[in-house]
Image: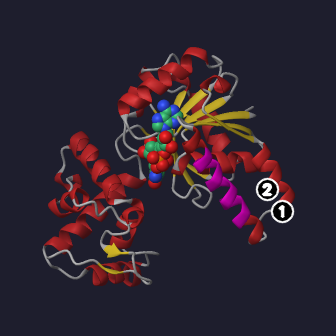
Amino acid sequence: MIETIGIIGAGTMGNGIAQICAAAGLQVTMIDISEAAVAKGMATVTGSLERLVNKQKMTDADRQAALARINATTDNSKLTNCDLVIEAATEREDLKIKILKDLCATLNPRAIVATNTSSIPITKLAASTDRPDRFIGMHFFNPVPLMKLVEVIRTITTSKETEERALDFVRWLDKEPIRAKDSSGFVVNLLLIPYMVDAIRALESNVASIEDIDKGMQLGAGHPMGPFTLLDFVGLDTVYKIAEIMFEEYRDSRYAPPPLLKRMVLAGMLGRKSGKGFYDYSTTPPRVSALGL
Ligand SMILES: NC(=O)c1ccc[n+]([C@@H]2O[C@H](COP(=O)([O-])OP(=O)(O)OC[C@H]3O[C@@H](n4cnc5c(N)ncnc54)[C@H](O)[C@@H]3O)[C@@H](O)[C@H]2O)c1
């Protein structure tokens, strides 16, 4: 039975996971490296819960109770007694390996450890711990409180029991799990990255404009947003990094990041997060960026 949960990283994903776990009734310890990062994570959770109350999707008493269940701190020793720890720190392999080694040195030996990594081989992270049988991937989607899916990723060393417990936990959080093995991209990015990369290639070869490619996939394929709107939402640097890692793993040109994507990342055009990507977000509604094509 999972009653206490630790979340490492109070960023975009970590604070979202902390929020849904606390709202579901778990005691949550959310860790980050600085007081500022912890405070920022808590401010996001507070704002998000307030919006749920304003939309009458949560009572004020439940909001207060959820907030009271989160202990946000820089003190890693507070994780020792957790039943499950989800690592959601910055996407850097050396950093994650250090975090996991330090964590396992003091963590309750029965606890399960999960990682939310999008692109680092989970088997490699598992091998850096003292519990490869109790280590698993739990890949949440952004924004965590809204997105229903969690990919549960087993490695060749994950025990059946750990996988079952992780699947049950995800269902208990009222999310929908899908099972995947530890291969780069899991399910969603395996299919989504070539699609986004192909849209950029279509633009590079002047098949159609940004707006018309977006409109085509919205109205012709029933997608809620076109590929360029999606690229800007995910972040061009993130897509670039994942595409590179997938290309390295499969050596298949379908995953190779196109030159335009690389140039846009080099130019700091990262999408919504930097204010400009395929669209320019300085105006409402956003307008198409001039890319000199
Ligand atoms: N952003 C997404 O859309 C998304 C989706 C699915 C999975 N992921 C994965 O989730 C993880 C986190 O991504 P994010 O978007 O939340 O990143 P983020 O940059 O928003 O947050 C990462 C947080 O980790 C903290 N951190 C760094 N070192 C730490 C340490 N030693 N101990 C504790 N905290 C530390 C940082 O200070 C930061 O607050 C990554 O592995 C990423 O691949 C991201």
| Label 2: how many Cα within 10 Å (few below 14, some 14–19, many 20+) | some
Residue at point 18%, 60% (across, down)? 263
Residue at point 37%, 63% (across, down)? 274
Note whether 189 is above or below 50 in the view shown.
above
- Which labelled disc corresponds to residue 178? none
Q: CA distance from mark 2 to mark 1?
A: 6 Å
User: Image quadrant of residue 226?
Assistant: bottom left
Decide whether residue 35 is among the magenta residues.
Answer: no
**Residue 117 picture location, percent across and down:** 44, 41
- Which labelled disc corresponds to residue 63? 2
| Residue type of the residue flagged with mark 1 | Thr
**Residue 72 picture location, percent across and down:** 66, 39
Residue at point 51%, 56% (across, down)? 142
Which quarter of the rendering shows the N terminus?
Answer: top right
Decide whether residue 41 is among the magenta residues.
Answer: yes
Observer-nearest of 256 and 220: 256
Residue at point 63%, 16% (across, down)? 109
Left or right of 178 in this view: 57: right
Observer-nearest of 215 and 76: 76
| Residue type of the residue flagged with mark 2 | Arg
Note whether 259 is above or below 82 in the view shown.
below
Q: For the magenta stretch, what is the residue range?
A: 39-51
Helix, strand or loop for disc 1: loop
| Label 1: how many Cα within 10 Å (few below 14, some 14–19, many 20+) | some
Res. 24 visible in picture:
no
**Residue 166 picture location, percent across and down:** 61, 37
Contact between labelled residues 1 and 2, with CB atoms less than 8 Å apart: yes
Helix, strand or loop for disc 2: helix
**Residue 211 picture location, percent across and down:** 31, 83
- Residue matched to label 1: 59
